[in-house]
Image: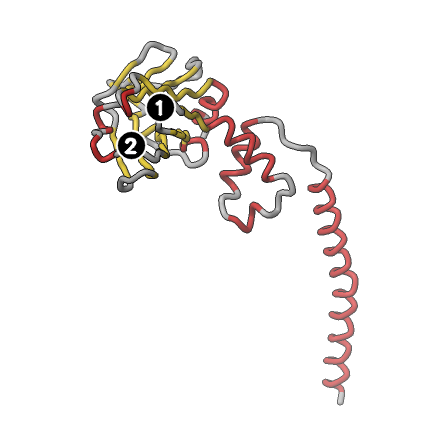
Amino acid sequence: MKKKKEVKTSLIIILSVLVFIIPGLFLFYLNDSKAKDNESTLSNNEEIIEIIKDNNDSDSRKDFDKFNEIEEIIENKIVSSDSQGEVDIIGTLLNVIEDDEDYIIIQLQFNTHTVDFSQYDFSEMATFKTSDGIEINKEILWESEGYGHHFMGYYKIPKVIENKELITDKTEFIELTIKGLDNVENRLLKWEQDILQLILKS
């Protein structure tokens, strides 16, 4: 009988503690959520990129009320395009989203209704330039995912050539030039310094 009373007393104490703890935790959660909701839209590019890198899965992204707005800002920064002739090219600087230790990676999306891409050797058509006067082509690697009127490929540019970094904090821009596609002499894709700084700090 005495043991039953002790057990009952213990249960009452535990429940009493929980009655105070659970509401407190709930209020903490509400205050924390309210604080997040009141945060102003992020304007600093570094903070925006960190959000995307730290919340790379779809469930986490839902936590940000203005994620679509942030995504649009980033898209405008990391994407460059060229629509000369019968071919549209969209180039995306992937390192901003997911860094690569060895390469600057540029994803290319090609769209056309008339041009046969299989006739071109894209590994021989690209030149990479920086504002610092660096220009390379033979060192560029090309990877593609099939061919057709709509296909995707990747140019991989070594970050270091002859012990020299291609992008530094003084680099004002980088350019990728594609020559001779659909009889267009040069197609130019360009990225500016503000987005390049994010690669250096990633």
Q: Which is more toward the observer, 174 or 15? A: 174
Tell me whether circle 2 and circle 1 mark residues in contact (CB < 8 Å): yes
Please give the name of the residue rendered at 39% of the width and 22% of the height, measured from the top-left corner: 189
Q: Which quarter of the figure has residue 153?
A: top left
Graded by Cα atoms within 10 Å as few (under 14), some (14 to 19) or many (20 or more), the crowding at tag 2 reads: some
Identify the mark at residue 62; answer none if there is no mark.
none
Graded by Cα atoms within 10 Å as few (under 14), some (14 to 19) or many (20 or more), the crowding at tag 1 reads: few
Q: Which is more toward the observer, 151 or 96? A: 151
Residue 20 placement (x, y as % from top left):
79, 61
Residue 165 visible at all = no
Residue 48 placement (x, y as % from top left):
56, 32
Q: Amino acid at mark 2?
A: Val
Please give the name of the residue rendered at 41% of the width and 31% of the height, measured from the top-left corner: 92
Sequence-wise, the earlier of marks 2 and 1 is 1
Which residue position holds label 1? 85
User: SS class of the residue under badge 2?
Assistant: loop
Which residue position holds label 2? 115
- Tell which residue pokes out farthest to the top in this image: 133
Q: Amino acid at mark 1?
A: Gly
Left or right of residue 157, residue 52 in this image: right
- Tell which residue pokes out farthest to the front in this image: 114
Relative to 109, is 167 above or below? above
Residue 6 placement (x, y as % from top left):
75, 80
Q: CA distance from mark 2 to mark 1?
A: 10 Å
Q: Which quarter of the figure has residue 47?
A: top right
